[in-house]
Every structure is written in C-alpha cells, then in structure tokens.
Amino acid sequence: MDELSTAGARAAALAAGHLAGVADRPVWRPVPDADRAWLSGQELPETGRPLEDLLEDAAARILPNPMGNGHPRFFGWVNSPPSPAGVLVEPLAAALNPSCAGGDHAGPLLERTVVRWLAELVGFPHPPGGGLLTSGASMATIVCLAAARQRAARADGWDAREDGLSGRPPMVAYVSAEGHSCLHKAAQLLGVGARNVRVVPVDARHRMDVAALRAMVAEDRAAGLRPFCVAASAGTVNSGAVDPLDAVADVAAEHGLWFHVDGAYGALGVLAAGAAPRYAGMERADSLALDPHKWLGVPVGCGCALLRDPAAARAAFSLVPAYLVDDHADDLGWFSEYGPEQTRPFRALKTWATLSHLGRQGVTRLVEHTSGLARTLAAMVEQAPDFELLAPVETSITAFRHTPREDGLDALNRALPVALQRRGNAFLTGTRLGGRDALRACFLHPGTTEDDLTLLLDELRLAAKDL
C-alpha cells in the first residue's frame, strides 16, 4: 500500500494543479497528432506498469487534452465544470467500490437522502422510494417512460412486460418539437416506435403548443390508437424554453396520460428569482428527469429519475432471482427493482458531497448567477448592430446569431462555432432554431464573468472575418 499512498498523493496534486490552472490555458485545442496516436493506438502491456508511470502518462497525454468544459469561457452544449467536492470524494467511492443495487451499506442509504434532496430543491413531491440515481437523464427517461408504458397497459387490462406490445393498439407518446432526443430514443428502445412519437409544434417562444397537443391526442384516440404519455420540457437544450407545464398537465389529466417532465438541464432553474411562475405545473408530473451532472456540476455521470408513484417503476422493472432475495430489505426493496441496472455505482457520494458543499443557498446563487449571465448576454446582443437574439432567455441559455451582413447568414453561423473553438479563447456550439442556423451559449460555470461575455462577442467577430 506504500505505492498507492505515494501515487495517490501525486494523483491528488495533479488533479488540483489541473483545476487551478484551467482558466490560464486555452479553452480547447485539437488533440495533437502524437497524442492522438498514443491515446487511440496503444497496445496492451505484456507486464504490469508501476502506478507512478501511469500518472506520468496521464500528466503528459491526458490532462493536456480536455474537453474544455472546466474553463469559465466554455459555453458549449450543457456541460458543467466539476464541483470541487465531487472531485474530492470520487476516489473514496472507488475505494469502496460497492454495487448500489441494494443491501445494508452506505451507498443505497445515502442515495435515499440525495434523491430526496433533489426532489425538495425543485419542489417535486417525494414519497419514500420515489426516485433513483441513473447514469444520466437518458437512462432516467427510459425508467420513467417504461413506468408510463406499464401503467397504461395495466389500465387496459394487460401486462406490457409479460405480453409485449404486439397485437395491441399502438401506444403513442407526445413530445415537443424542441424536446430532447433522449425522449425519442427511449420510445424506440421501449418498443413504442419512432412513428408513434408525435412531435408537437411549438409557439413563437419555442414552447409546446398546447392547443395542438390537445388536437393531436383527440385525433389519435379517434383513430383507435392508445395515447399514453406526454413529455414536456422544463428548459430545452436549444434555447432553455420552459413549456407551459400547467396547461400540459391539464391535457394529461383530461386524457389519462402519464405526464413526464424533462428537467435534465433546466429543472433547477426554478430556484432563480422570479422564475417559479414559469415552472408552475412541474409538481403535477408523474415523473421528472434531472441531471445533477449538469447545472450542479456533479462529476459525470449522474442523472436522477423522480417518480410521484414509485410503485409504477417497480412494476415496470422488478425482477428478483433467488440469489438476490434480501430478507432484511425494507418494504421499498432494492434500487435495482426500479430500473434496468443491476450493478449500480456509488453515484450518491459525489452528489451528496456537491450538494452538502453548496447548500441550498449555494445552489440558488449558482442558478441565479448563470441565469443572470444569459440575460446579460441577451441584452448585449440586442444592443449590438451585428448580432440578433433568437429566443427569450428563460434559463441560462442565450440563443442568437451573428449578422454582419445580409446574405449567407445560415452558412456563416453554421461555420462560426468551429472557427471560434479553434481560436482557443472561447467555446460555444451551434444549433438550428426556428428554421435558422443559430449560436447558443450555455452558462453553468460559477467563475464566468461579464468580461467573458464581451470577449465572446469579440471573438465571434474575429472568427467571422475568416469565413
């Protein structure tokens, strides 16, 4: 263990040094050819290597080639910097290396607390056992939609797990045109099928059109189909738009649909000053997916599925072979009964550490700071003659585009993100919004300042000159 102690201290120093120097390095750079060849082309060693040698390789080849999301001027996708508390305790989770499927040990017990904390933060009802941590919102969405599918089948007098979907009226799910791709993937994986996922149009604010939703459900019922679920967004990835959740909940209640809310990125936005009215109705959902590894900065990967009725997920997934029967388990059983994973890592430790380190006030400050940056950038864009705001700011995303000329704007804004990234001073990504190529800046870093916003616009102008 002397080797582990020495190498462990070195690893901690490397991690701390990397984090301390992030802001002084380029946000991102292409991986050099030599590093690329080493990273992707190594042969498995015939004999074992000392731990110290592994750290030297990590220092020379891995740490210098980050994604960039630890930098305060990284505004791409929805990728946060790691919380210091989460980084600190990750080695402890690895040292314990438990399976958190269930059992009487720290992992599952701490997960109960963490899931309850997350529900309390966003104001979602939390019955005992009403949720579990997952690898991310994609897996959380599968959990939630599987519960919805099973509930709908049982309401109709059959069992989707036992009988499969063949021979039954097609189940239909409803997703906003701005809904995340994980909703479509979940429906496909669960046998619903892509053709039975209805894409509901959005209004001028990029929110689900509730009148269109209501008409689509009625049309599908009249055609003999089986509407079973509607998924709304509490903060889309494209623009941060929050769907009219209360109105969507009304439609779900009228038609007996499972009401799911995708809050993977945006659910925590409810904590920002004045934001709560936009989120009215989120608490009415049957399920809510959110990602602690997004706005909270919990090290990847950690998602969460919250459920109004935990029995629905248990009905969709519980399968306990004789070798896993635990006579000492409480009435809630094991976490592995509520989702598809049997061996489950100790995700709760890094989430608990992050939330404990921040506290409710710290989480609120983070949300308000980053949401404020998005509003500030929007104001700067509106005041600039060569930029155009494309959507209202509702969370911590600003959607806009560069307009230095009258023609070729789609091609320009499509090319700008890569050109900006290669300059190394700021990083954002592109998308399409309202049929136009757009730029989107997502703010999650607690260290980002208004000066960084000025630099971002200046860098976009410079990058555009070469396009």
Image (cartoon, rainbow, N blue to C red):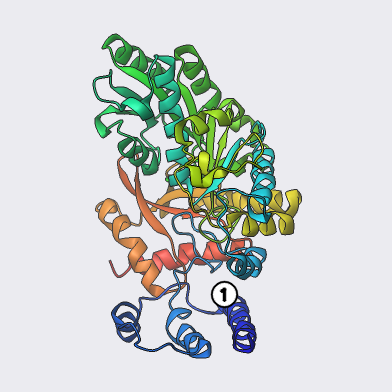
Between residues 451 and 433, which one lies in front from this camera angle?
433
Above or below, comparing residue 94 to residue 112 in the picture: below
Between residues 405 and 206, which one lies in front from this camera angle?
206
- For label 1, the residue is 23
Tell me the residue at 60%/88% (across/down). Answer: 3
Above or below, comparing residue 92 to residue 292 in the picture: below
Above or below, comparing residue 380 to residue 192 in the picture: below
Q: Describe residue 219's horizontal placement relative to residue 264 as left or right.
A: left
- Percent across and percent down for residue 342 are 48, 49
Residue 239 visible in the picture: no
- Percent across and percent down for residue 263 are 53, 40
Residue 454 visible in the picture: yes
Q: Residues within 10 Å of mark 1 (few under 14, many from 20)?
A: some
Tell me the residue at 57%/37% (across/down). Answer: 306
Q: Amino acid at mark 1?
A: Ala
- Percent across and percent down for residue 299 are 56, 61
Q: Describe residue 369's horizontal placement relative to residue 18 as left or right.
A: right
Residue 293: image quadrant is bottom right
Between residues 371 and 50, which one lies in front from this camera angle?
50
Q: Of all residues shown, which one is farthest toward the top?
A: 222
Q: Describe residue 301's horizontal placement relative to residue 420 as left or right.
A: right
Residue 246: image quadrant is top right
Q: Tag 1, which secondary structure?
A: helix
Q: Of all residues shown, which one is farthest toward the front?
A: 322
Tell me the residue at 51%/35% (across/down). Answer: 242
